[in-house]
Every structure is written in C-alpha cells, then in structure tokens.
Image: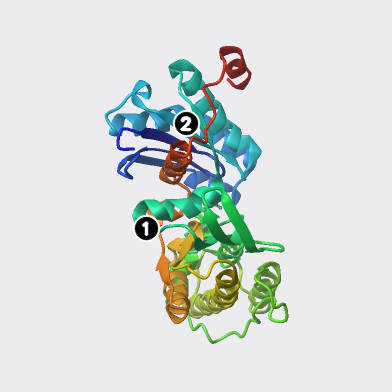
Amino acid sequence: KDDLVVLGIETSCDDTAAAVVRGNGEILSQVVSSQADLLERYGGVAPKMAEEAHLQVIDQVVQEALDKANLTARDVSAVAVTIGPGLSLCLRVGVQKAHKLASSFNLPIISIHHMEAHALVARLIEQELHFPFMALLISGGHNLLILARELGQYIQLGTTIDDAIGEAYDKTAKWLGLDMRRSGGPALEELAQVGDAESIKFSTPMKQHKDCNFSYAGLKTQVRLAIESRNINAEIPISSASCQDRSCRADIAASFQRVAVLHLEERCERAIEWARKIEPSIKYLVVSGGVASNQYVRTRLDLIVKKKNLKLVCPPSSLCTDNGVMVAWTGIEHFCMGRFDPPPLADEAEDFV
Ligand code: KG4
Ligand code: ZN
C-alpha cells in the first residue's frame, strides 16, 4: 500500500483542486484554486463561467500538485477523479483531464462519488475509524445522513427535501450584504459570533416529522422576511452599514445559525438511534463537507455525539471543503479493493479529449 501513489482531481463546483496522496495516507501535495472573483461578481456559482475558470487553470493545478509532490504523471499509480454529483459542465473538465493523463501515461482511472469522498477522507485522518460508522455530510448542495456499513455500501438515513444547509448559509450571507469574495458560510459564521442568537425566534424545521430528513427552504424564507421587515439593504455592504444596522444583521446571522444547526442536532440524535438498530457496534460520527468547517457546528454536534456515547471525527477545514485529497484518498480505498477502471483505449480516450 505504501508504494501506491494516487493523483486526485476535483472540479465538481467552483474549486479546481488536485492532490497527490500515498497509499499509507501521506499527503504529498494539495492544490486548490478557487473562483473568488467570480463568486463576488455573480453572487454565487454560474455554471458556464465556472467551467471556463476550471478550463483556464486545470492544467496548471494538476502540474503544481505533481511538482509539489516531486513526481511526474509517469510516477503515479492511478488517477482518481470526481464524476458526480455536481455541475456537469464543471465535472467534465476534471474528467477530460483525467482521461488525457490516463491515456498518455497508461494509468487506470478511478471514478469517485463526491459525497463518498467527503465521508471517506475522515479515514485518512483517523486511523481507528473502521466500518461501520455514521456520517453527516453538509455542503452547498447536499445534506446527507448515512450509515457506512462497508466500502461502497451505504444506507441513507436522511437527506434534504429541498435546500442544503450550505445553500441557506450562502443566501443568508448574500441577503445580509456580506463579503461574497469567499463563499457565504465563513463570513456568516464570523458575523454570528457578535450577534444575539436568541434575539429572533425562527422556528426549527420539520419538528412534526419524526424522521431524519432535512429542510432549509422554510428557514430561508423566515430569514428573508426578517431581513425585509427590518429594512436591511443588502446593496449596502455590511462594512458601510451603521452601527445599529450592523448589530441587527449580526443578530439575524446568529439566530439563523442557532436554528440551522439545531436542526442538524435533532436529526443526528435520531439518526444515531436508528443506525444503532442496524449496526449496534458503531463508534463514530463523521461530520464532513464544507459546512463542517464551521466551529459552532462542530461544537454543537460534539455535544450530541458525546451524549450518545460516540466519537466525533471532523476533518480539518481544508479537507472538509472541496479538495483533491479526499478524491485521491477515496481512489486509494477503491484501488486497494480492486475497484477501478483499466486505462482507456486510445480511441476511447479521444472521445473525451
Ligand atoms: O463541500 P463544499 O466545499 O462544496 C460543495 O460540495 O457544495 O461546501 C461548500 C459550502 C458552501 O455553501 C459554503 O458556504 C459552506 O460550505 N461553508 C460553510 C463554512 N465554510 C464553508 N458554511 C458555514 N460555515 C463555514 N465556516
Ligand atoms: Zn463538496
């Protein structure tokens, strides 16, 4: 396993990422190029623009990942690439690059599911994390509670019936006039720290549904109405707002965050009970995906997990948000089980490049 070296490529949304990871979990390099200027200009991800931005940097990002690892493409054992879910225009850029490399250097390709990669990267940082385990995956497009029984064998305990929590963070941040040069989540987390989380009583979603599904569309509407009724103008950036206006925005941010995370807490608590009926031996809850880099989310979920006598595994922030390491590592897991595609045939590869 130590001889294995996998290049991971990730282009499912707005980050162009590549990394080289060794079979023993050693991260040889990690490169992420984010589309900060586009995010600010469009207030979110515009697929066509994102595709062009990926195309502009993909060769450079992959080359940098190889250079930093002191390797050439000839030295790697396989290329792992995210094939979905994500924006298809964007995914294609990564997949084409992987096929180009695979056909030029006769390398196998390992197709990676983006959400599986978010979950499995936790096994790179926590050696004791064996199957079965639970995972809460929270990102811009997904809210998933899963029971991972084996590699490739996952039971979905809950999913969102409308929006994901990251989407709710991003919209709330936009409506509050926060700096969109980075995604809304981190900016909102920062503002929430100076607000009063009890000031506005937003109602917790899906209280009457005794399942493990999520819903954030209703909370988004509650937040939008609160913002409108307080005459907050998102056109005025928070940095230019009056002192009173700023503290009002902070109160909304904190109140939103409290309820958004309370919804996660309630669902996780129930899901742990459900999962134990199927796999009584579970010891860990993994929390991963972009929103898992939020410190308040981590602290609150840690309390739930402790109460339920489990351990929380939350990868460091750089491995929670989209990255190439999680793709390379998931590739290693599959490669070791013999699950990968052989190198593409020359003419087959032509179709992709
Ligand atoms: O996993 P990810 O990088 O991309 C997707 O697969 O969607 O997650 C991105 C999401 C965005 O909605 C972003 O606002 C959110 O993760 N996010 C955060 C934080 N950092 C990133 N949300 C709340 N607090 C954060 N600190
Ligand atoms: Zn993601």
Residue occupying the point 39% across, 57% down: 317
Q: Is residue 83 above or below residue 350?
A: below
Q: Nearer the viewer, mark 1 or mark 2?
A: 1
Number of the label disc, if any, that sits on residue 58: 2
> Disc 2 residue type?
Ile
Question: Would residue 97 be found to the left or right of residue 87 on screen?
Answer: left
Question: Would residue 101 be found to the left or right of residue 42 on screen?
Answer: left
Question: Would residue 116 be found to the left or right of residue 48 on screen?
Answer: left
Q: Where is residue 15 in the image (x, y as percent from the top left)?
A: 49, 43
- The single residue placed furthest to the left in the displayed view is 70
Structural crowding at the residue carrying mark 1, measured as other residues with C-alpha within 10 Å and reported as few (<14), some (14–19) or many (≥20) = few
Instruction: Name the quadrant containing residue 204.
Output: bottom right
Q: Where is residue 244 in the image (x, y as percent from the top left)?
A: 50, 81
**114 or 189, which is in the foreground?**
114
Q: Is residue 52 above or below residue 238?
A: above
**300 or 348, which is in the foreground?**
348
Q: Position of residue 92 (x, y in %)?
A: 60, 32
Disc on the earlier residue, 1 or 2: 2
Alpha carbon distance from label 1 to label 2: 24 Å
Number of the label disc, if any, that sits on residue 154: none
| Residue 204 visible, this angle | yes
Q: Position of residue 236 (x, y in %)?
A: 56, 65
**Quadrant that contains the N terminus:** top left
| Mark 1 residue element | loop
> Disc 1 residue type?
Pro
Residue under circle 1?
316
